[in-house]
């Protein structure tokens, strides 16, 4: 069975007890979360989010420069007024460089992706601090509270990272 088929079966169970069809479009807790796509991080459970509470924007690393389009939509059209960044221990982004991935794509797909910044990092705290700073300094982002965390995949705990 494909995973998609398994999802259809799981969704049938979800629908059977679904009671949240009347939620409003704007996130009720007025917050946008930018988090890594890592399979071990479940923002809803780790942060106590329910349907309708928050925008959760996910990408490789939880990098904010890759989330700007969504953040602008979130703030300008859907009223969020706080941003939370979540990177995590043992992130895949700690394991490669732009050159490594660019060479792999060149070898395997015969494509030049030298123009793509894959945004890997080698210092977890620093990556969070950089992303907080980028949001604070961006003229495209409202002056709202921005908090950065490292999620520990080993313990489930979020650790707040102080700004630089
Ligand atoms: Zn990650």
Image (tube, rainbow, N blue to C red):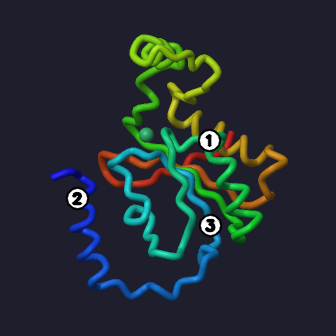
As measured in the structure, the alpha-carbon distance from the residue carrying label 1 to the one carrying label 2 is: 30 Å
Q: Percent x, y for residue 91? A: 41, 36
Among the two numbered marks 3 and 2 on one chain, the one whose residue lies closer to the N terminus? 2
Between circles 3 and 1, the one closer to the viewer is 1
Q: Residues within 10 Å of mark 3 (few under 14, many from 20)?
A: many
Helix, strand or loop under label 1: loop
Helix, strand or loop under label 2: helix
Q: Residue at x 29, y 76 (%)?
A: 14
Q: Percent x, y for residue 48? A: 43, 70
Q: Percent x, y for residue 58? A: 51, 50
Helix, strand or loop under label 3: strand
Q: Which residue is mark 1?
A: 66
Total number of numbered discs in the rendering = 3
Establish if 113 lies above or below 130. Answer: above
Please identify the residue farthest to the right as the structure is shown.
139
**In the visual, does 16 lie left or right of 92?**
left
Q: Residue at x 62, y 47 (%)?
A: 67
Between circles 1 and 2, the one closer to the viewer is 2
Q: Residue at x 81, y 50 (%)?
A: 140
Q: Residues within 10 Å of mark 1 (few under 14, many from 20)?
A: some
Q: Residue at x 53, y 19 (%)?
A: 98
Q: Which residue is mark 2?
A: 5
Badges 3 and 1: C-beta atoms under 8 Å apart?
no
Establish if 15 lies above or below 91. Answer: below
Q: Which residue is mark 3?
A: 31
Badges 3 and 2: C-beta atoms under 8 Å apart?
no
Badges 1 and 2: C-beta atoms under 8 Å apart?
no
Instruction: Report whether residue 100 is seen.
Output: no
Label placed on residue 143: none
**In the visual, does 38 lie left or right of 98?**
left
Among the two numbered marks 3 and 1 on one chain, the one whose residue lies closer to the N terminus? 3
As measured in the structure, the alpha-carbon distance from the residue carrying label 3 to the one carrying label 2 is: 33 Å
């Amino acid at each position: 069975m494909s995973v998609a088929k398994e999802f259809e079966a799981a969704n049938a169970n979800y629908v059977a007890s679904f009671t949240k069809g009347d939620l409003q479009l704007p996130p009720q807790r007025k917050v946008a979360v930018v988090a890594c796509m890592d399979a071990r991080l479940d923002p809803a459970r780790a942060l106590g989010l329910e349907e309708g509470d928050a925008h959760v924007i996910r990408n490789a690393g939880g990098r904010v420069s890759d989330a700007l389009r969504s953040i602008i939509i979130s703030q300008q059209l859907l009223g969020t007024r706080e941003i939370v960044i979540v990177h995590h221990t043992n992130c895949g982004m700690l394991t490669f460089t732009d050159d490594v991935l660019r060479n792999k794509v060149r070898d395997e797909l015969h494509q030049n992706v030298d123009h793509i910044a894959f945004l890997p990092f080698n210092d977890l705290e620093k990556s969070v601090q950089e992303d907080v700073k980028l949001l604070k300094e961006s003229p495209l982002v409202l002056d709202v509270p921005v908090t950065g965390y490292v999620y520990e995949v080993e313990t489930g705990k979020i650790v707040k990272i102080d700004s630089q």
